[in-house]
Amino acid sequence: MQLGMVGLGRMGANLVRRLMRGGHTCVVYDVNPAAVGELEGEGATGAASLADFVAQLDGPRAIWLMLPAAIVEETLDTLVPLLSSGDTVIDGGNSYYRDDITRAQKLARSGLHYVDCGTSGGVWGLDRGYCLMIGGETDVVDRLDPIFKTIAPGIGTAEPTPSRPADATGTAPEGYLHCGPNGAGHFVKMVHNGVEYGMMAAIAEGLSIIKHANAGQVDRVVDAETTPLRDPWAYQYDINVGEVAEVWRRGSVVGSWLVDLIADAFAASPDLAQFSGRVSDSGEGRWTVLAAVDEGVPAPVITTALYERLQSRQLGEFTDQICSAMRSEFGGHAEKK
Amino acid sequence: MQLGMVGLGRMGANLVRRLMRGGHTCVVYDVNPAAVGELEGEGATGAASLADFVAQLDGPRAIWLMLPAAIVEETLDTLVPLLSSGDTVIDGGNSYYRDDITRAQKLARSGLHYVDCGTSGGVWGLDRGYCLMIGGETDVVDRLDPIFKTIAPGIGTAEPTPSRPADATGTAPEGYLHCGPNGAGHFVKMVHNGVEYGMMAAIAEGLSIIKHANAGQVDRVVDAETTPLRDPWAYQYDINVGEVAEVWRRGSVVGSWLVDLIADAFAASPDLAQFSGRVSDSGEGRWTVLAAVDEGVPAPVITTALYERLQSRQLGEFTDQICSAMRSEFGGHAEKK
Amino acid sequence: MQLGMVGLGRMGANLVRRLMRGGHTCVVYDVNPAAVGELEGEGATGAASLADFVAQLDGPRAIWLMLPAAIVEETLDTLVPLLSSGDTVIDGGNSYYRDDITRAQKLARSGLHYVDCGTSGGVWGLDRGYCLMIGGETDVVDRLDPIFKTIAPGIGTAEPTPSRPADATGTAPEGYLHCGPNGAGHFVKMVHNGVEYGMMAAIAEGLSIIKHANAGQVDRVVDAETTPLRDPWAYQYDINVGEVAEVWRRGSVVGSWLVDLIADAFAASPDLAQFSGRVSDSGEGRWTVLAAVDEGVPAPVITTALYERLQSRQLGEFTDQICSAMRSEFGGHAEKK
Amino acid sequence: MQLGMVGLGRMGANLVRRLMRGGHTCVVYDVNPAAVGELEGEGATGAASLADFVAQLDGPRAIWLMLPAAIVEETLDTLVPLLSSGDTVIDGGNSYYRDDITRAQKLARSGLHYVDCGTSGGVWGLDRGYCLMIGGETDVVDRLDPIFKTIAPGIGTAEPTPSRPADATGTAPEGYLHCGPNGAGHFVKMVHNGVEYGMMAAIAEGLSIIKHANAGQVDRVVDAETTPLRDPWAYQYDINVGEVAEVWRRGSVVGSWLVDLIADAFAASPDLAQFSGRVSDSGEGRWTVLAAVDEGVPAPVITTALYERLQSRQLGEFTDQICSAMRSEFGGHAEKK
């Protein structure tokens, strides 16, 4: 079927490519004409403006937005007046699920449909497929099924789940899922990213503990401020953490795509020297924590992983200064620099 | 080659089966004669006692222990006097890596070799292969290579790591790795389990947040002790968490064997009612935390996951009672039951 | 000066008593006539309804609300139409600071002033004084200074801060502080309670570790699921935790009112048997975490303390069941009950 | 009575001064002759060597060591051969309690007594008194009671605990406590410091959240990597955190010596600019975590506070690099510097 794509960054462009490979036709638009031109060269129909874009789509239109969360609102302000009753807008980015609820209500007043679609897969999705978590009205989501089916990885990309009943229905084994009404898609994607934070931190901490298994070989200053390592004999290992990541890829309980990726990163750069140690966070992790707190569901691991990222960017510095100041007050401790 | 196996529980028996499928011959012993008999029926040579077991093995012997950590020591006390210089004992269980160091030193005094081999794979390893993390002297580990190669999953069980140099050597892509001298294998396996705790907790917390996305539909008591949910409209979702686990299996960043497994568990039991919520911990998680603290490497996510398990078994109850008592003292708060 | 008090629970009634002791006159109202009658007997002027209450106050009126956060809004709905331009409403409860901002704006449209006043001190405040954290317009707060000064503990209740400049101004050493515009008072009080959660948890965890210093004397089941304690000789102490709390009250770095209180609780009940171990949370802790996440300030200790409370009420049970289910899947582990 | 003091740093010297003020006589030794000379000038008897020191003490001797934990062992190696049966050595520093157990056993073989005495109070103890947590044999501890009583703050330094029975015995209200056999004193002091870490972190995090209540005024970069603050209107406060600390000193639930101290630090330095944000840890915090893990008692707040200190010194950097590397792999995210 036909789909319009607004936003041709890494994710948007690859979604278009995967759809075209799957036999769909795509009309594409981006504020950057070069991005439009590139996809035109690959078979898409380019548009010079949002108005041009809308004009080239057959009704009822299906329009996918693949934009940074911060500019979805202003794009909709321009786009919505150009649309006709019965058209559908799909937000495939990382919008906050609460915005989905209010946007869907607003669009409904113009007879428009809204679908929120959390999209996971990163730069590898073109070949690997994207995992889709979808929120919206059932009939609207059903109508878009051919699109979702093509974008998703497909059932063959993993072994069947042994206990799944033979007569079980549903698209989850294809890699896409209608999670519920508007917002449900981005809610599940939001938590997915929270889980991702926790898994990444667990893997990273573990590999770091392995890296520092040589702690007994490293001299520590001995003074009133630093405790000596009591058992240096037990920390005399020089372990190749990249090879550890590689070996964990097969047969182990921690086998996962994230372990695959870190094995690759170590293969490319054994000391990871190009990474400064500053880890960004882009919204979903924070929102997951807010949801956990609102729900009253303890989420200590996910929250700790978020804070670890904030601390990697020294956002706890004032906290640390206060601790230092207290130590100075009660003990006359001057912190080492 | 020939291997002797002591301990024919789930793991030990399946290791034997996998080795025999791979063309090796096995001599087996267990305190439970029925376990011995079962493997005899599948082609193994059974032994009636440790002495009989040792007698049936060709020198230099290779003996694999697959026992609970708590009884390794006493088994060695009986076994070691029966062995001859040049024999090798492999501890494939979950021993503490520090015990490996002292045991290897002790065995060396009798001319014996010791190899510690962390073995991951659980009940699925027979078909899937086991991930092996190995510690010991290089020539001893090399000599056992045919055994490790057969037990491990093999290179075909995962996609190649793209950035791995074409001329890279090493067995990690086969699923087994010589990590370093004695203790290094169990050290890496210990941390592996710590990572496993963290990943499991991240997945579980996330699915729980999704399960409780209906918090706005549930009545909360409103009184001075309980804050009302400010935005009940934002928590009105009834999401099928089992289907969420299934959809995350393909194409998503959190794709992992643990997600595969929880999808299976939900397929078999949508409300997990048979699980009490008490989560055991079996040593490696605790030891990982001790190592992190000794090394001075922050491991907040792994540690938090450990504590979450302890709390699931109410081991923090006295702590909670003290908090309650303080609240009663300063605010006259009587905790609800 | 004259003050009207709405809400004569523990806190409201004691505020009235402390004000009357300090020479102020009070008009009082509560939905419960008995509470009104009791304070009339102590010298306050009682009111039979909100209308009667307003009628008995001289303009410009100063009215203090001491109510559960959940009913402040509806009380204001009734009260505001009865008031006159220039009157001031003080919310002394635990309202969310964001509500202060919107309420102040709403009241301003009727020519009314609004002051938010976080009040700490619990059941002991009558004699000890209450710590006040105040938000509102400067001239309005200044006009109420005699009220705040009387309620606050007073400068003599703690040693002077040595480094405080002799010419420093400000009321903080009296125990009350104008923190900023509307909401600032409850913001500071909110975080105060978050700090309180963290301090309580730290004290409680520590005393619990001391209580369990006898872990080496307690038998543990030894099986594949439970690691034995390696150094039982190091955990052979039976320490009286109540006496530890008492000794920490003098001269130690952890000396604090909370330690005073827990020493008292242990003196009254050495095993704290009347406390079930369920610890409530009443809003401020959750809001503190939301603020930390919004600000991007890591607050792992405060957040962990909040989650510890949620876990004390088994709100993480589904999370734990999921972990149990995964363990069952990969290892065939049946959790002990 | 007479006491010998070895180690005349800040703590040791002030202990001597407090004892002399209380009418005791002191023989003093330090490797630094100037420290000896200074106390001689204040009335102590100086010694030129450990042998001279021992010779000047009357038997049975009472010798207090106030030394960094790392040099206690070597000092004992020199000191013990000089002593006579019946003499007592008190370790008043921050030794690991397990060392106390082995040292006491070793000294007992020479007929010597050993007392471990955790000493809290910092640079303020001279005037304020020191909180003492004592381990050792009952008769030996009893004999030293006059010393402990003088060093401790004394009963008048805090209000009586209301619920403490009038006929309760014990020295805890004086500020010193015999906690149990050898090691029990340092065990309690160790946990005390763990509690201190947690309380400090809670206070510091809270004040930091208050400091950043202006987050809505600060521009944030808006891009795909950074989520915009949704409610900037709610974070518009410029709050004086030093005054907040001061106001919390009186009447609030968080009132504590640590709050007193941080109020003083802010009074001296409103922006704490002289503190780099690196926070040391000196052993007890780590040991507290090890004990919690061994005992199976969850201590998430204390542990988190320890890790926060480690992170303040960038000890989690490799962990962060690994997370960054994974983000780069799956999303092409280049971390901002």
Image (spheres, coloured by chain):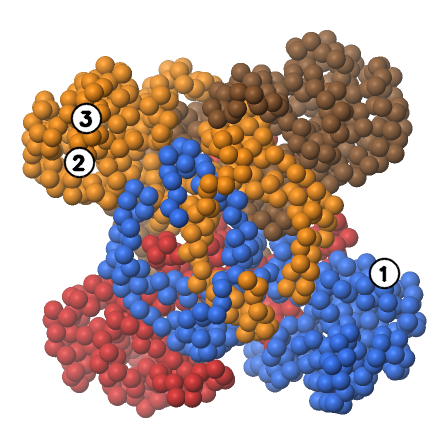
Chain colours: A orange, B brown, C red, D blue
Return the residue at label 3.
A37
Tag 1 and tag 3 share a subunit: no
Return the residue at label 1.
D105
Seen at 32% across and 73% down, the residue is C179
B103 sits left or right of B250 in the view: right
Dividing the picture into quarters, in which one does residue D83 lie? bottom right
Of the residues shown, which amino acid type is indicated by label 3?
Answer: Gly
Task: Identify the disc placed on residue C319.
Answer: none
What's the CA distance linking mark 2 and mark 1? 79 Å
A100 sits left or right of B210 in the view: left
Q: How crowded is mark 1: few (under 14 residues within 10 Å), some or many (20 or more)?
A: some
A2 sits left or right of B148 in the view: left
Residue D133, x across and y down, in percent: 69, 70
What's the CA distance linking mark 1 and mark 3? 83 Å
Subunit ID for the residue under disc 2? A
Residue D210, x across and y down, in percent: 37, 65
Tag 2 and tag 1 share a subunit: no
B101 and B256: which one is in front? B101
Seen at 23% across and 14% down, the residue is A23
Q: Quadrant of the N terminus of chain C?
A: bottom left
Tell me the SS state at disc 1. Answer: helix
Tell me the SS state at disc 2. Answer: loop
Q: Quadrant of the C terminus of chain C?
A: top right
Residue A204, x across and y down, in percent: 52, 40
Q: Do the residues labelled 2 and 1 touch (CB within 8 Å)?
A: no
Subunit ID for the residue under disc 3? A
Q: How crowded is mark 2: few (under 14 residues within 10 Å), some or many (20 or more)?
A: some
Q: Is residue C20 above or below residue A246?
A: below
Q: Which of marks 2 and 3 is nearer the N terminus?
A: 2
Dividing the picture into quarters, in which one does residue B168 lie? top right
What's the CA distance linking mark 2 and mark 3? 11 Å
Return the residue at label 2.
A31
